[in-house]
Each structure stands twice: as structure tokens, then as C-alpha cells.
Image: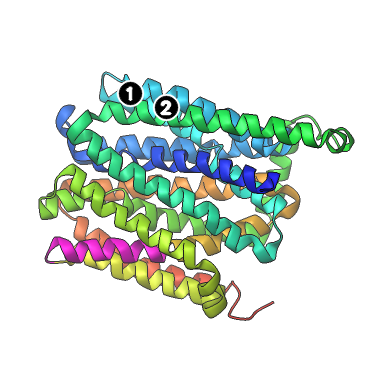
Amino acid sequence: MTSSSSMLRLISLAAFCSMASMRVCDPMLVSLAQEFSVTTGDASAVISAYAVAYGVLQLFYGPLGDRFGKVRVIISATFACAVFSGVTALAPTLPVLVASRALMGAAAAGIIPLSMAWIGDNVPYEQRQETLAQLMVATVSGMMAGQWFGGFAVEVLGWRVAFVVLSVLFVVAASMLLRQLRVVAAQAPALAEGAPVPPAFSLRAYLASTARLLRMPQVRWVLAVVAVEGALGFGTLAFVPARMADGYGLSASAAGGVMVLYGLGGLVYSLLARRWLALLGERGLVLVGASLIAAGLLLLAWGPVAAWAALGCFLAGVGFYMLHNTLQVQATQMAPEARGTAVTLFACLLFLGQSVGVLTVGASVDRGFISQVFSVAACLVVVLGMVVSRRVKGRGAP
């Protein structure tokens, strides 16, 4: 096994933990609302706070990754996640829980986007879609594990235990990454000594670089599209367990189990990404993906029984990752000379869009309009897919 493949596996482990921590609260919302005597919409602040912090801190991690090395920053962020996950487990009130989740999101912000940027630095464009799909296997598996374990912990262990377990996993991932980084450095000391030293961080230079990126039409287009995708995709995803619990009477663990189907859909795409890309091209992936998301959301909104909603969950998972992985590839290529900053801007807009979506859908949950909001999101996703398909490659395009 080469050092690059070993590093990719360990980065993927950190990404697994990051995504598990991101989605672990989804099946907890109803229970948290009951424990702290608030509405489900109010309890969803634990998700939106994480998303806002995760998105904003991308602007901080991008230049750090370019300056100190992406893997070093990933390791530091993973250790920080371990600390803040432990703090979250001790939160005595909802405001403290929301604040600790925000800190956890701020730490996790340095893992997945910089992992994407590392792939962009080390993998040729022709192999990048497939390699990003491999990373996606880890992130989707983390999402599945987080959503299921969050529901299981609520019913069997207590929700605080979930964050203790996450803290331990983060420590393991960070320790293994640090060890691998030292092995790589020991194997190539001459290369490390001869490598150019990046310039010291300058806020003025960073703002100028960011402004230059934002003047690029391709960058602005990708960022705008991913913000909308975050609002429509992740914004609705957060409330699927609440929909399963309130609409079909499922328990927290059963609702979390249904959410595993969403991740399973993403996993199916990840394993078949190469074949589907060859068959459909990026344009076909986007159109089919948007259609599957829309179908899944409509089944979740109006399915007469839980089985139909579960099918919708699976279809939405396949479709979302067909669309999102294509946008990730665009993000890694939109500014190769400043890939760390560009990719973290991409993630920033994705999760700021998610926070807007969570707040919007959260308000609808409290007013009984969740089915209608899911339906509107389904229509808008189809429009988004048509817009994106005009800017990416068709089948057989060079």
C-alpha cells in the first residue's frame, strides 16, 4: 500500500467521524424537544448552529491549509472535535448544547473540505471523480452511522453517550493520522527540505485572494449553485426523522434506521460512480440525480405508509450524491492555484445554505407544513438540476 493510499484511508476515517457528528442530532430532535420543553423547530437549533459554524469557519481553514499543509490542519481539527464532542456530552441546558454544537461544527469544518482539497492536489482530474467517490463512501457511511446511532443512543443509552463515543473515535482518527504523517515525513526528508516554504499568513493577502476568486464567473456560479443545493438537500434532510416519527409514528431508533437508507443510496452511487459517469456523463448524472431527489422528497411528503417514505429516503440519497459529487468535482477545479481556499469557500456556501434551509423547514414543522415544504423543495431541485446540467460535461466530453 502506498503512502498516498494510506493517507487517503486515514483522512477518510476522519471524514467518517466528521459526518457522523454532523448528522447524529437528526433523530434526537423530538427527544431533545421533550427533554428541554421546547418545540421541535426550536430544538433544531442544535443542527443549524453546527451548520453555520461549519460554514463560516471554512473561510478560516482554507488559508490555514494552504499555509501549513492540509493534512496537518485536518489532524488539529480532528483533535479539536474530540474535545468539543466531550464538552457537548456534558451540556446541562439547550443553550449550552447549542453553543457546544457550534464549537463542534467550527472544529469539524477543517476536515472534509480540506480532504477534498488534498485529493485535488494529489489526484489527476481524470481520476478525481472516482477518488472523491471513495471519500464519499466514508462520509456517507459516517452519515448512516451517525443517524442510526443517534436514534439508538436516545432510546437505549442516552443521547449524551453518543457524543462520548464520537469523542473517542475522533481521538483514534487524529492519532493514526499524526502517526502516518510522521511516517511520510521520515520517508521523504529531502523532498520536504527542498519544498518551497509558503508565505506567512496575511489577512490582507487572504482577503485580496478571496476577492479575486469571487470575481471569477465560474467560482461565483459554483458557489451560488451549492448554496441552493445545501438549502434544498441538507435543509430537508435534517427533518426526515421528525417526519418519520410524527407522520408515521416511528420510534427514534426506527426513524434513524430509515435514514440509513438515505446514506445507503449515497453508498450505492459511490460504488457505481465510475460506471454511471461513463454511461451518463456529468450532465446525465445531474439530471437523473435531481429527478431522484424530487421523487424521494415527494414520497416523503405524501407517501401513505412508512414503506413509501423509506423508498423516498433511498431515492433521495442516490440522487443527492449524484448531483453533489458532480458539484464537488467542479469545486476542486474552479481555482487550482488556490484550491484550499476555493474548496473551503464551496463548503462554506453549502453549509450556510443548509442553515437557511434548516431554519425555513424548522418553522414549517412547527406550523404543520412540512409536506408542503418538501413538495416545493422537490420542484426547485428539478429546476436546479436543469440549470447545472447546462454547465457541466455530457457523456464522452473531453
Q: Amino acid at mark 2?
A: Ser
Identify which residue is drawn at 53% across, 26% down: 79
Relative to 279, 124 lies left or right: right
The mark found on residue 89 in the picture is: 1
Location of the C terminus by quadrant is bottom right
User: Is there any visible trace of residue 398 in the rendered image?
Assistant: yes
x%, y% of residue 241? 23, 49
Q: Is residue 143 magenta?
A: no
Q: Is residue 317 magenta?
A: yes
Badge 2, how many Cα within 10 Å: few under 14, some, many 20+? many
Badge 1, how many Cα within 10 Å: few under 14, some, many 20+? many
- Residue position marked by numbered label 2 in the rendering: 167
CB under 8 Å between callouts 1 and 2?
yes
**In-front residue for pair 193/357:** 193
x%, y% of residue 92? 27, 18
Magenta stretch bounds: 304-319
Q: Amino acid at mark 1?
A: Ala
Q: Earlier in the sequence, mark 1 or mark 2?
A: 1
Secondary-structure class at tag 1: helix
Tell me where residue 384 sits by quadrant.
bottom left
Identify which residue is drawn at 49% across, 35% down: 108
x%, y% of residue 80? 51, 25
The mark found on residue 356 in the picture is: none
User: Is there any visible trace of residue 32 in the rendered image?
Assistant: no
Tell me where residue 229 sits by quadrant.
bottom left
x%, y% of residue 287? 45, 75
12 is higher (above) or lower (below) than 202: below
